[in-house]
Image (tube, rainbow, N blue to C red):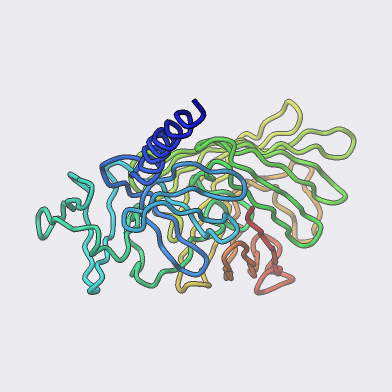
Amino acid sequence: MKTSICIALCVLLPAAVIPLEAQQAAPPDSLLAFTTIRMKDHSLFVGRITDENEAEIAFYDNVLGYLTLPRREVRSVTPEVDGARYEVVLINGNSFIGTIGSRSAHAFSLDTKSMGSLTIPVEYLAGIQVIEGHPVQDTRHDWFPNPNATRYLFAPSAIPLKKGEGYYQNAWVVANSANYGVTPHLSLGGGVLLPFAAYATPKISTEVLPGWYIGAGVLVALLPESTLAGIGYGLTTVGNPENNITLGMGYGFTNDEATEKPVFTLNGMARISEKVALVSENWLVNVTLVNDDETFDEDPQKAYRPFVSYGVRFMWDRFTIDAAFVNGYLIYETFIIGVPYIDFIMRF
């Protein structure tokens, strides 16, 4: 009897184990997938995420099969985007731009404007990445993504924070704030301006067309003596996370009283190298005019006056430093080039 049980186990156990191993070794789907994971050492993996936790990402690469990638070594994760334009680089150096058409387990078609539909075997693929909005650089430079694409110096753009991403900002030492992407379209944040105010900055935004974003938000601050003040605003941004321009309009308020005329903003950034971008934030504000003797009229007059800024953003993988000058009404009379502005932003 014992001999029969042993023989049965010897026959059945391999039969039970072999299908399990075969199932683990098989791809999660017979068709190619194009989620891309770029590592900090510039390695690139293309395939699909099969599982993930705080420490690791289980990934099926189209060529290498199953991999376990430590999150601490991951630079960026770009999900596959239906209908998006991709730049595809082959192992011989050729590159093509188009949209992904049909696909099988070992090849896919790329629909290009100049060459028509190209069939690309996956083993010839050296790199692939989504082109967001308009192509702004030779993607073969392999620049890391802009770590601070949703904000200029202080004002936001309409480009949304990704879900689960956030950043901490310190400006002039006394201003501290943080923002976090709660959903793909909603971010929540707040901060303190020591020792004067505490504030909250919720924002909603979305990409309505490739390279065109819209958004809206409010900045609400609690000032001394329990005074509430802030600004509600709307934004539209044209471009992409590396190069963009934003037009905004908003109305300020204090307690239950709102300003009669809106505030306008025109902001922009341009990435000129892997680690350097130019940034400018500009406001058109309806202010109370001051006499030559710097006293207010009994019946003060108001008019629109510009406040401008210009500076440089230095970028690393997870943080940026802005060095700029802010100038405008009354400032230039004392500081010709403007007041220095310094901030530090760390992404998390």
> Residue at the location (57% across, 65% down)?
317
Q: Is residue 218 above or below residue 73?
A: above
Task: Looking at the picture, tell me which residue is in the foreground, 41 or 338.
Answer: 41
Q: What percent of the width, then of the height, locates residue 1?
A: 49, 25
Task: Looking at the picture, tell me which residue is in the foreground, 63 or 206.
Answer: 63
Q: Residue furthest right?
A: 225
Task: Looking at the picture, tell me which residue is in the foreground, 234 or 7.
Answer: 7
Q: How many marks?
A: 0
Q: What percent of the width, then of the height, locates residue 224?
A: 88, 39
Q: What percent of the width, then of the height, locates residue 248?
A: 51, 45
Does residue 261 appear anywhere in the picture? Answer: no
Q: Is 104 left, or right, of 57 in this rendering?
A: left
Q: Is residue 165 above or below residue 172?
A: above
> Residue at the location (10% across, 60% down)?
115
Q: Is residue 15 above or below residue 172?
A: above
Q: Is 126 left, or right, of 325 in this rendering?
A: left
Examine the image and state in which quarter residue 279 appears: bottom right
Q: Is 199 left, or right, of 123 in this rendering?
A: right
Q: Is 252 left, or right, of 71 in this rendering?
A: right
Q: What percent of the width, then of the height, locates residue 210?
A: 33, 46
Does residue 149 appear anywhere in the picture? Answer: yes
